[in-house]
Image (cartoon, helix red, strand yellow):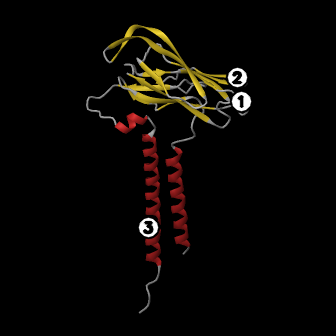
Amino acid sequence: MIRLRRTATAAALALTTVATAVFGLAGPASAHVTVNPKEATQGGYGRFAFRVPNESDQASTVKVEVVLPENAPVGSVSTMPVPGWTVAVEKRKVDPPVEVHGSQITEAVAKLTWTAAANGGVKPGEFQEFPVSMGPLPQVDRMVFKVLQTYSDKNVSRWIEEPTPGSPEPENPAPVLTLTAASPSAAPSAAAAATGDDSAGGGTAWGIAGLVAGLAGLVLGGLALLRTRREPAPKA
């Protein structure tokens, strides 16, 4: 009986360790401004959301300015209405022009500015997403969006530092969209292209949950088998 209890304890500890290691891979979410999804295909179109968390304990975020990179102009940029916010679009001249559906575009969006209505904004402990549609995406490895986040107390968080691959993350990193070359044989999911959400992350989470559940089943099954082997056979 003592050996059986020790085996059960060891099995439970092993299961806890595995679950901690698996779920610990995700880690806590960073509190800086990000663009989601973080990867896309060159030449394609997509829906992207700038996710802005409020880091202040007392003030609300009342203005968000997103600067599009000058070295990677996008021919078409449109915004989605965000309740309680208005958006202003600034453009700049593009030379050489950008080709979109056979037409030469001489202007491209340079900056998007969202401003909250009076007494509105992103309150402490909350976050807000600002969706945009962009395309065709440029033939570059990545797009770096510099963001200014203004609070109701006039403080400004400047998410403008460009992360360097292989180096520690800067203190105030700018959101980065990684772009990969289109594969001739690649056929992206229509649903993913239409929504632009993090469905891949959700699938990964379900897969991890299934893995842990399977491990739990194996441990419980082993304990049951061990208990059966140790129970004395009934006398005739």
Q: CA distance from mark 3 to mark 2?
A: 58 Å
> 10 Å neighbourhood of mark 2: few (<14), some, or many (≥20)?
few
Residue 44 or 167: which is nearer the viewer?
44
Q: Say whether marks 2 and 1 touch (CB < 8 Å).
A: yes
Confirm or deny contact between disc 1 and disc 3 (CB under 8 A): no
Give the image location of residue 210, x and y in percent. 44, 54
Residue 11 vs residue 141: left or right? right
Q: In which quadrant is the C terminus drawn? A: bottom left
Q: Which residue is mark 3?
A: 221
How many other residues sit within 10 Å of disc 1, few (<14), some (14-19) or many (≥20)?
Answer: some
Q: Amino acid at mark 3?
A: Gly
The one nearer the camera, 103 or 236, is: 103
Q: Which residue is mark 1?
A: 59
**Where does residue 151 sit, x and y in percent of width and height?**
68, 25
- Please name the residue that numbered disc 2 is placed on: 155
Residue found at the far bottom of this picture: 236
